[in-house]
Image (cartoon, rainbow, N blue to C red):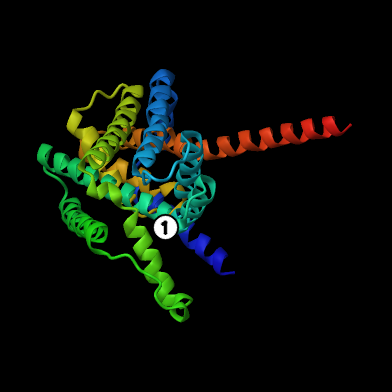
Amino acid sequence: MKKKIFFILIWLIVAYFFYEFFKTVDFNQAWKEIESASAGWLVAAFLFNLSILLVWTSLWSVLIPKAIFVSFPNLFQANSFMSTSCNSLPFPGGHAVGLVLFARLAKIQHSVALSVLALDQMLEGIVKVVVLTLAASFSPLPEQMEQSIQVFIVLIVLFIVIMFYAAYKIPKVKNLDEKFSSSLLFRFKTFVSQWAGHLEILRDYRVFSAGLFLALVMMALQALGIWATQMSLGQELPFWTTILVMAALNLATIFPITPGNFGIYEATAFLIYKFSGLSPEMALSLAFLQHICFLVPMAGTGWVVLLIQSLNLIKEKDKEQDKQH
């Protein structure tokens, strides 16, 4: 019963966004704009967004402690499932499911998986601050967005301080007394100690720099995906518009409230495009196509990987049965 109420509330939020932001749109004209989109540019946008997963997997391979080896295919599988869960379920369900799947598929401890994800989010946060700063330097921003950027920067700085403190200052827990080893507090301290111990890239500036570079590449690919979508509708917009759209989307979708940020993504992109001077119909068309070109690879790749695995398992079972006969 609680789940039903929860999902009803989610879709009420989606309905609100669609009504409040798109009530002035001529949907027939918007649909004509979508139909006129260039398929080639849309494929390019899809491929740019798909490439994010490959770079993201490479980032994880850098963030995993040196003493632990996970093959790139296994990491890609875990990464695609993480992306699917985060882009299908609202926060924090998607992240929790993704964390568990990551640990199981990569065959690593949960403390290792959590350290990789925490480092991933920290590097992504640093890059987002860069993007938001760029957006603010190119053009005057709406007052609410400026306030949101300031709050976000403060939160990211606090997060970075906590991460570096954990990497350098949290001591290792030693089990000196067996009677305390089974206590909840001791297990929590042990987990935190193990997690902090896996933040080793923060103690190696070369590895940290490599991770930061890959996070920047991911953001550049996202920008290229947005740009290719704009080109699909013949909109040769200024560079700062693409940066502004990406910055606003990164702010609005930090914590997914609806599955796949459906409704929130469209409303955010729609408002920025209108702010940039586009018609409501063109703004909605761009927002919708952008989201599709982003969501299909980011949420769909995990399902494709799962399908391929299932087909391989069926083939292996058929081969075993043939051998027995």
The image quadrant of residue 144 is bottom left
Say which residue label 1 marks. Answer: 111
Instruction: Confirm whether residue 302 shows in the render.
Output: yes
Up the image or down, 272 lies above or below 5; here it is: above
The reply, left or right, for residue 273 in relation to residue 31 is left
- In what element is the residue under mark 1? helix
* Residue at (34% x, 46% y) in the render: 267
Residue 218: give x, y in percent of width and height: 31, 35
Counting other residues with Cα less than 10 Å from the Cα at mark 1, is it few (<14), some (14-19), or many (20 or more)?
A: many
The reply, left or right, for residue 263 in relation to residue 107 is left
Q: Residue furthest right?
A: 325
* Residue at (39% x, 45% y) in the render: 67
Up the image or down, 240 lies above or below 105; here it is: above
Q: In the depicted view, which residue is nearer to us: 324 or 80?
A: 324
Residue 176: give x, y in percent of width and height: 39, 75
The reply, left or right, for residue 301 in relation to residue 239 is right
Instruction: Confirm whether residue 274 shows in the render.
Output: no
Q: Tell me which amino acid carries mark 1.
A: Ser
Residue 42: give x, y in percent of width and height: 41, 24
Q: Residue furthest front?
A: 176
